[in-house]
């Protein structure tokens, strides 16, 4: 069952609004809003698990006209949420009449607390209040109203033990429901993903559904710097060791290594929102000892400069390769120091990717929001609680070739030699040759003809996340994936 809510897309902007509310918009502004691409949020019942019933569901951001028959379903990567696809998705539906692009927000994102972010976006809370709610309380016992992480501060108690089972089996069962909804539109369904989402895409295509490959539901695959190739499976002993270790620690991935698995998601969600809603304010995070020193510029930055500095390839520290982009640089002067967009990924677009603020009530003269309900809250571009089990299981997908580790992990990606559909793959420097090699092997083992394989090598140009961040006119995904989809649809 799916519940859909609709609103027009808008660009996030500064909090100064001298133009009045959307109710007093001029006819020209109303016409412009009406012409904006349609975006809907749909909730779909997922697989039945041992988790609380309210977590057995996924949400999908649907971009493009509701009556478009063809659907590209995109699956996020590690610690990513559906909204980080939105700028790219909107570019694609503009280039492809007759197509929708659906971004999947996996079940783990339902664990997040966006209550204060929504208040901040609505103008009901200050930047300081938002910072204190999510992070400031960690160093100040006097802050009594604050974020309560799922499973406690370290997210490792038994209240979230169910998430240790949120591996490939659960992700594929949930994704099956999304693909079935897309197929009901009556057109072609192409499944794609970025990073780990590419591995999940290959897993779905080669998954055994009662003797049939998942690929039978699909018209194509789109792998954006991700995937899975044969010959990469762990040994059964390694798979068992991974499960044994998981049983003794947090179910969730700890990217920044602080013992706070949710921290990287909160840093990104809060930083991106501040960059959009209060871009020129001095960064509170820069002044706080709670933010790692290697994320901070040498002088007091604005919110937008702090955010750009932390994610730009030239200044972002080692360990953040999953989110680094070609954004820009600190301004040469100014107190606080501002930001200069001289890279192909504008900082505002990057912040919109991760904030998801375009699905909430944001102030500003360019905003046209209707139909905002609680269903739209809590959808950003990060996953605060990424299940470790999903990453463990992905190693056993092995290009859809059965292997002993799959038996240990209960992974059923066994139809790797039975595919008959076109494949698109784009590789960045992060792929290091693995993405295109894996796509070639996937095609070769199933006998897919060369003309049905579209390989795009941008390893000399792009970071791992540039494909979503680069502005429309220069985006290589739009330039290469759109023609691939057009041939299918």
Image (tube, rainbow, N blue to C red):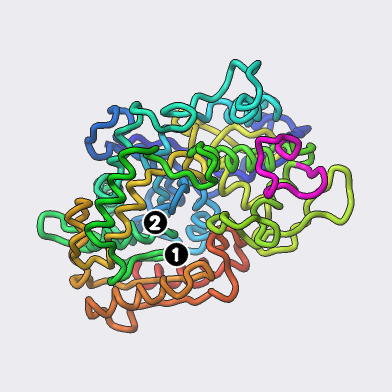
Task: Out of 207 and 243, give the one closest to the viewer.
Answer: 243
Q: Mark 2 falls on what kind of element?
A: helix
Which stretch appears magenta?
284-302
Left or right of 12 on screen, residue 237: left
Q: Quadrant of the C terminus?
A: bottom left
Q: Position of residue 252 (x, y in %)?
A: 41, 41
Q: CA distance from mark 2 to mark 1?
A: 8 Å
The quarter of the image holding the N terminus is top left
> Does the segment drawn in magenta span residue 293?
yes
Q: Please, is residue 130 above or below residue 457 in the view?
A: above
Q: How many marks?
A: 2
Q: Which mark is residue 291?
A: none
Earlier-in-chain disc, 2 versus 1:
2
Q: Residue at x 34, y 34 (%)?
A: 3
* Rendered residue at 21%/68% (across/down): 401
Q: Quadrant of residue 235?
A: bottom left
Question: Which residue is the site of mark 1?
Answer: 224
């Amino acid at each position: 069952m799916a519940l859909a809510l609709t609103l027009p897309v808008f660009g996030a902007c500064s909090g100064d609004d001298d133009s009045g509310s959307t109710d007093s918009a001029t006819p020209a502004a109303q016409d412009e809003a009406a012409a904006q691409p349609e975006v809907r949020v749909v909730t779909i019942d997922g697989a039945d698990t041992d988790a609380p019933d309210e977590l057995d569901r996924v949400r999908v951001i649907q971009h493009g006209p509701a009556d478009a028959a063809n659907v590209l379903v995109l699956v996020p990567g590690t610690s990513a949420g559906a909204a980080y696809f939105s700028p790219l998705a909107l570019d694609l539906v503009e280039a492809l009449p007759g197509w929708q692009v659906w971004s999947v927000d996996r079940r783990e994102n339902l664990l997040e607390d966006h209550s204060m972010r929504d208040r901040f976006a609505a103008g009901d809370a200050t930047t300081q209040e938002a910072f204190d709610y999510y992070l400031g309380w960690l160093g100040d016992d006097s802050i009594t109203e604050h974020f309560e992480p799922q499973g406690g501060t370290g997210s490792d108690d038994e209240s979230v033990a169910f998430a240790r089972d949120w591996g490939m089996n659960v992700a594929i069962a949930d994704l099956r429901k999304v693909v079935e909804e897309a197929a009901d539109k009556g057109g072609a369904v192409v499944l794609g993903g970025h990073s780990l989402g590419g591995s999940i895409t290959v897993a779905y295509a080669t998954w055994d559904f009662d003797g049939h490959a998942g690929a039978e539901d699909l018209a194509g695959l789109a792998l954006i710097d991700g995937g899975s190739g044969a010959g990469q499976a762990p040994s059964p002993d390694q798979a068992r060791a991974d499960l044994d270790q998981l049983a003794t620690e947090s179910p969730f991935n700890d990217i920044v290594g602080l013992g706070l698995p949710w921290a990287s998601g909160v840093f990104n969600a809060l930083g991106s929102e501040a960059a959009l809603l209060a871009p020129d304010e001095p960064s509170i995070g820069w002044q706080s000892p709670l933010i790692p020193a290697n994320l901070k510029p040498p002088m007091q930055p604005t919110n937008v400069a702090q955010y750009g500095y932390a994610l730009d390839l030239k200044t972002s520290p080692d360990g953040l390769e999953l989110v680094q982009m070609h954004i820009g640089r600190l301004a040469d002067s100014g107190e606080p120091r501002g930001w200069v967009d001289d890279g192909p990924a504008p900082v505002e677009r990057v912040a919109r990717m991760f904030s998801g603020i375009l699905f909430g009530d944001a102030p500003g003269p360019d905003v046209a929001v209707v139909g905002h309900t609680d269903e739209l809250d809590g959808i950003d571009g990060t996953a605060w609680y990424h299940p470790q089990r999903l990453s463990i299981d992905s190693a056993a997908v092995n290009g859809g070739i059965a292997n002993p580790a799959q038996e240990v992990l209960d992974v059923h990606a066994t139809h790797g030699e039975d595919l008959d559909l076109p494949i698109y793959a784009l590789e960045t420097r992060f792929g290091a040759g693995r993405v295109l090699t894996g796509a070639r092997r996937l095609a070769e083992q199933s006998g897919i003809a060369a003309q049905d394989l579209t390989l795009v090598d941008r390893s000399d140009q792009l970071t791992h996340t540039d494909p979503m961040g680069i502005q429309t006119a220069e985006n290589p995904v739009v330039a290469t994936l759109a023609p691939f989809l057009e041939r299918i649809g």
